[in-house]
Image: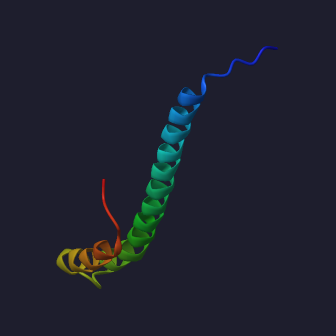
Amino acid sequence: MDLILGNYQDNIKCDSIYLITAKRISETTKQSQKLSELRDWFLPMLMNGKVTVGEAQQELGMVAEESEKYN
């Protein structure tokens, strides 16, 4: 089986694209996990009337302040 390799510049470009994509996937996975945790924490309280939507939005606003950026 023959293996075809691109030139050095093409390999560098591909590596760069791969690293950017891998970083974005990692960040998105972390954000998704955090959102799932928040959902699991807030939903029972909302359903039991222990917190209102306004209070939940205020709490979520404080959590959002901790994050680095949103895309």
Q: Residue furthest right?
A: 1
Residue 43, x across and y down, in percent: 36, 72
> Which residue occupies 39% across, 68% down?
39
Using the image, determine if residue 57 lies above or below residue 12.
Answer: below
Nearest the viewer among 54 and 26 is 26
x then y, percent, for residue 40: 43, 71
Instruction: Tell me: 17 left or right of 54.
Output: right
Residue at horizontal 42 percent and vertical 61 percent from the top? 31
**Where is residue 54 shown, x and y percent of the image?**
17, 77
Instruction: Residue 59: name its quadrant.
Output: bottom left
Residue placed farthest to the top in the image?
A: 2
Residue situated in front as seen by the camera: 58 or 15:
15
In the rendered image, the residue lying farthest to the front is 8
Q: Residue furthest bottom?
A: 50
Occupied quadrant, residue 49: bottom left
Q: Quadrant of residue 60?
A: bottom left
4 is higher (above) or lower (below) than 62: above
Q: How is the image coloured?
A: rainbow
Identify the residue at image location x=48%, y=38%: 17
**Figure quadrant of the N terminus:** top right
Question: Going by the image, does 37 lie left or right of 12?
Answer: left
How many marks can you see?
0
Residue appearing at x 47%, y 46% in the figure: 20
Horizontal relation, residue 6 to residue 34: left or right:
right
Q: Position of residue 37 (x, y in %)?
A: 45, 70
